[in-house]
Structures are given as C-alpha cells and as structure tokens.
Image (cartoon, helix red, strand yellow):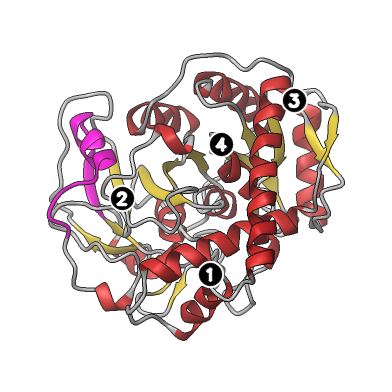
Amino acid sequence: MPDPTLIDRYNAFLFRDDAAVGSDGPLAGIAVGVKANIAVKGMPFHAGIGAWADRIADADAEVVERMRAAGAAITGILNMEEGALGSKTDNPYFGATINPHRDGYSPGGSSGGSGAAVAAGLCDVALGTDTMGSVRIPAAHCGVYGFKPATDRVSQQGLIAADATLDAIGPLARDLDVLDRVSRIVGDFGEDDLSGEGVRLSDHGVDVHPAVKRQFDAALNAIGNPPTVKTRRLLSRVRFAGFIGVSRRMASDLHGVETSAKLAKLLTYGPRRSVEDWADDQAILTETREWMLDLVKEHGFLILPTVPNPPFPHSDAEPAAQADFTCLANMAGLPAISIPAGWTDDGLPIGVQIVGAAGAEAGLFRVAHKLDTKLGAYRAPHP
C-alpha cells in the first residue's frame, strides 16, 4: 500500500480499494488507477462533475475488463478536470491535484490525477482519457510516459466522453516497457512498422518556452534531425476549432446538469458560434485530419514537443496553448506517445511526443524506445 500521507498530499485518488488484488496474466502485479470518467464496477463514476458525485458504476468499462482479465489490480478512482474539459486539474468539487515534482504546481489535465498518481508511485499504471491531449499533457508535466491510442482502436464503452469523435482512453506509466505491455491490452495494437524517417513542424505559430525548445532540440538531435514540413494553419486556430466542437457536444450532453460557473462558461462557446464560423471550424478539422493522415503515411511519424510550456503553479491561469501540439493526433484519430525529454533549469519535467499511423503501434513504440534510450530523461520526483 502506498504511503497514506502521499495519497492525501497529492489528491490524485478520490477513492481507493486497498484490498484490490489481481490475478495471473501479462499484467499480474500491476496496480491500476482509473480516471473518474471511466466505469469501474462498484466505484464512483462521476467525470469530476459535482452533480454526479454519488453515482456508482454498475459494470466495468471494456478497457477495465481487459485490464482485469490480464491480471491487473484495479485500485481506485482518480481526480480529473470537471467533465474532462481543461488542462490544470483544479476541480471545484474534488479539489486540486498536486504535481509530485513541485508542491503547489499543476499536474496538467484533464487526466491530472492519472499523471500525478503514476509519478508519485501511488499506482503502477493509470488510465486517462485524451480528447485533445489529456493523457499526454499530464504525462509531460508529471515526467512520465503516456500513450493515446488511435481513436477507433480502443473501446469507448463505459466512458463518459467529452467528445466521442476525438476521445481515446489511454494509459500512463513510469516505465516505457510497462506502457508498451499495457497498451497492447487496452486496445487493438498493430504490429506494423513505421514507413519513414519522420518529420517535425515549422511555421506552427506556437510560442515555445526556451527550456522546452532546448530539450526538444536535444530530442531532434538524438533521433537524427528529421526534416521539417510546414503547417497549413496556425496550430492555435486548429486547437480552437477542436475546442468549439468539444464545447458544442458537451453543452448538449450536459444540458440541464448543474456545473461550476467555469465549465458553464466554457460550454457557451460552441452553441453561440455562428453557422458560418462553425462551418469554417469543421473545414479546418477535416483539412487537419487529411493533412495529418497524409503526413504519417508519407513520412512515418511526426515528432513534436508535448506541451509548449513547463508545469506551472495552480495559482496561475492555465496557458491556452497547452494543447496546440497534442490536438493534432486527436483531429486525425492517430496514436501518439509522450515520453520524458528533459528538465528545466529548476527541475521541472518536459515531454516530447511522437505521432504515427494507426496499425503501426509497434513501430511507434520502437521509435519511442530508441529515443527514450538516448535521452534517458525519466527521473522520479523527490519525496
């Protein structure tokens, strides 16, 4: 059992079953925490929404069934952003989750409880959900590994989705080998290799923090300095188009449900969008999807910073651009891995991500393993 003082300190777990045990199988001995929008039979199932705080799941989500069948022990439910919309994990009903690498700092979101629990050693693996980066952003901010499967290769049964067209349930872990093993259980995992040597983006319009740029440059050097391709649009515009779609769908799904004032405001953006602007948003999403699919087909993979900024204090407003890089994989429904890339001068973690083709998950992990070996950037937080 983890140190109870750490459980309280980080507020990553909202519910724990310390008597949980696993069974024989490829995940025997693995303790798993599950984000609160994924159903675990007999445990809270509220998606971080206060009005649903007393809801208990009556059956396991399919991904949880898969984990149990593989021998994993399901140990509890993890904190998250209200409704999975946001990248800070300061929940108005369930409190703020603390980044294990720095007291008072955000672990990212929306799967912040998942990232913090794994980084702090409170579980071996956590399941999160990724709408526009919500597995990979906490993985980067908490200095761990995170995998977003291809959208159509992992079940959404038993998930309270923010946007089913973008969402994917994915795991986080402290070890890339463990992440690899778990990812083969969570969803359909293709054994194909990647078809090219990779590319990076230019002209993306994102303001990248100097420490992130430094560590990303080191990752590029380690992987052989792949050539650049130009973005078709500023990534902030792509991310905003995605946000509008999420806002529209959540506003419909949560109609009549009491939420915080913050979430209620976010849910006004989509419905009040003009017909003309929404048509433009949809065109951007379609264009981005086709561009990304063509890109990985031609070049094999895309390498990017995971988040343009390092972790930040909960007292600060969350940077709007946090999902500018991560949103691209969701728009195209592609698999993506975030791995630790290095550190700021004052010891905060930074991540790098690789996006590849659906059906070539094994190839994507091979690239990630090669890069991870060269970077050697994983570091456990100081207690």
- Determine the residue located farthest toward the bottom in the rendered image: 261
Q: Amino acid at mark 3?
A: Ile
Q: Say whether residue 63 is visible.
A: yes
Residue 244 vs residue 187: left or right?
A: right
SS of the residue at dot 1?
A: loop
The residues tagged by marks 4 and 3 sit, at their Cα atoms, a distance apart of 15 Å
Mark 3 or mark 1, earlier in chain:
1
Please name the residue that numbered disc 4 is placed on. 337
Q: Amino acid at mark 2?
A: Gly
Q: CB atoms at circles 3 and 2 under 8 Å apart? A: no
Q: Which residues are magenta?
A: 57-76
Quarter assignment of residue 323 = bottom right
Q: Residue at x 52, y 47 (%)?
A: 380
Task: Tell me residue 273's x, y (percent).
Answer: 62, 72
Task: Tell me residue 378's x, y (percent).
Answer: 58, 40
SS of the residue at dot 2?
A: strand
Please name the residue that numbered disc 2 is placed on. 33
On screen, 228 above or below 284?
above
Mark 4 or mark 3, earlier in chain:
3
Q: Amino acid at mark 1?
A: Asp
Mark 4 or 1, closer to the camera = 4
Neighbourhood count class around disc 3 (C-alpha, 10 Å): few under 14, some 14–19, many 20 upward: some
The residues tagged by marks 3 and 1 sit, at their Cα atoms, a distance apart of 33 Å
Mark 3 or 1, closer to the camera = 3
Q: Residue at x 28, y 78 (%)?
A: 51
Instruction: Return the mark for residue 271.
Output: none
Quarter assignment of residue 374 = top right
Q: Amino acid at mark 4?
A: Ile
Please name the residue that numbered disc 3 is placed on. 223
